[in-house]
Amino acid sequence: MPRDRLQELQLRKFRRIVQWAYERSRLHRNLYDQAGMSPEDIKTFADIARVPKVEKSMMRDIQGIDPYPYGDMLCVPLDEVSTYRQTSGTTGQPVYQADSWQDWEWWSEAWASLLYAQGYRKSDRVFLPFGYNVFVAFWAGHYGAEKLGCEVVPGGVLNTEARLLKMQELRVSAMMATPTYVLNMAETARTRLGLDPAKDLYIRRITCAGEPGANIPATKQRMEEAWGAKVYDHIGATEIGAWSFECQEQPNGLHVNEGLFLVQIEDLKSGELIEEPGIPGKMVVTALDRFAQPCIRFDSKDIIQWHEDRCSCGRTFRMIKGGIIGRADDITKVKGVLLAPTAIEDVVRSIPELGNEYQVLVTKRGDADHIAITVELRPEAGSSQKEVESRLTSRLRLKTNLGYELTFVPFGSLNRFEHKARRFVDKRRQV
């Protein structure tokens, strides 16, 4: 769709969801009334920026009141809520998410769109190696794959070894997992089962979510080499939906699904909208077709930037460059230098002698910041620890402009994760 028509569609949908929420949600009505605005005031695309933002803390504050447990955001009767999910709680108290049957069909449509863009077809047999829990995780991926006509194999209660053997037995062609678990599964296949995923399994494509690794070049390369498969990124969130995806062209960026979502980028200091490519800012997002518990001008805290190019796939959706750069509450100053944890991951995973896992710890020593990294040296590493340490030190300095205390531990010493991993710990915030 041409850009001007796409924006007309987004404006029409935005006005509809704001009107819906204003009429049915006490939280949104109070928010808009306090700002002195009404849905009728939204006449042009520029007017959208006047609509007050919603933050996750506001959603937590209303939980536990009637209609229980969702509170003042709910826009449908309780008996129309068909699906419950909650956020993972990595940034605080989990947020409860109510969806109607229509909303869950919308979730499936968003996922079907992204999976099709990544090459999934009816001929695929897709394995889901995740625990079917209260977190949304790949629930919608399951239904999106079914909507495309794929054969879906759930692997929820199986352990990692059993999942791998079932994948081999059924010759599954695709799977979905966090980057952490994709690497963990490959390591388990080699060390515990004597399998080479690239040769002994049949995976051709992998869709990742939950962490930024699939758009970190070194991590993507590790996954693709380990599995002999194409790895595609996707970005979504429980309270937002599946809003962004990488297509088969892998254009060093992700498409925003602008038919279903409106994404804006705000300057971190001024709050002004950023339209120019290459300038990082904070994402504000609206799910244009989610009605039970609307997501309108949601301040995600994610740092993204517009891509300067259009994708050769032909989609007119705008792209973000390099995925999510970090979070506004994660990008922190260490020794006076702004640091994004994703930069450390890119360096560690670029050195083949190092294992997949690492830990970063930031503390105070007196008045000075101190940052330490713990890494694993692979037993088959041909280089000496001293040589690897020299390479790691120089690449970290070049990439982040910081010096680190490095500790090498035996391979397998650090925790392995199945879902989201917490590798960056800033203990200065806990003082």
Image (cartoon, rainbow, N blue to C red):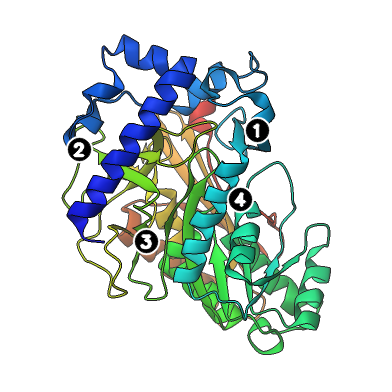
The vertical placement of 145 against 25, above or below, is below
**Sequence-wise first label, 1 or 3:** 1
**Label 1, label 2: how far apart the Cα atoms are:** 31 Å
Q: Residue at x 59, y 46 (%)?
A: 104
**Crowd band around label 3 with a 10 angstrom C-alpha radius: few (<14), some (14–19), many (20+):** many
Q: Position of residue 8 (x, y in %)?
A: 23, 46
**Label 2, label 4: how far apart the Cα atoms are:** 39 Å
Q: Residue at x 75, y 53 (%)?
A: 131
Q: Which residue is mark 3?
A: 254
Q: Nearer the viewer, mark 1 or mark 4?
A: 1
Evaluate if marks 4 and 3 touch, with contact meaning CB atoms under 8 Å apart.
no
Q: Which mark is residue 81?
A: 1
Q: Say what amino acid the circle numbered 4 marks.
A: Ala
The vertical placement of 163 against 257, above or below, is below
**Sequence-wise first label, 4 or 3:** 3
Q: Which residue is mark 2?
A: 45
Q: Position of residue 153 (x, y in %)?
A: 74, 68
**Crowd band around label 4 with a 10 angstrom C-alpha radius: few (<14), some (14–19), many (20+):** some
Q: Which mark is residue 200?
A: none
Q: Say what amino acid the circle numbered 1 marks.
A: Val
**Sequence-wise first label, 1 or 2:** 2
**Label 4, label 3: how far apart the Cα atoms are:** 22 Å
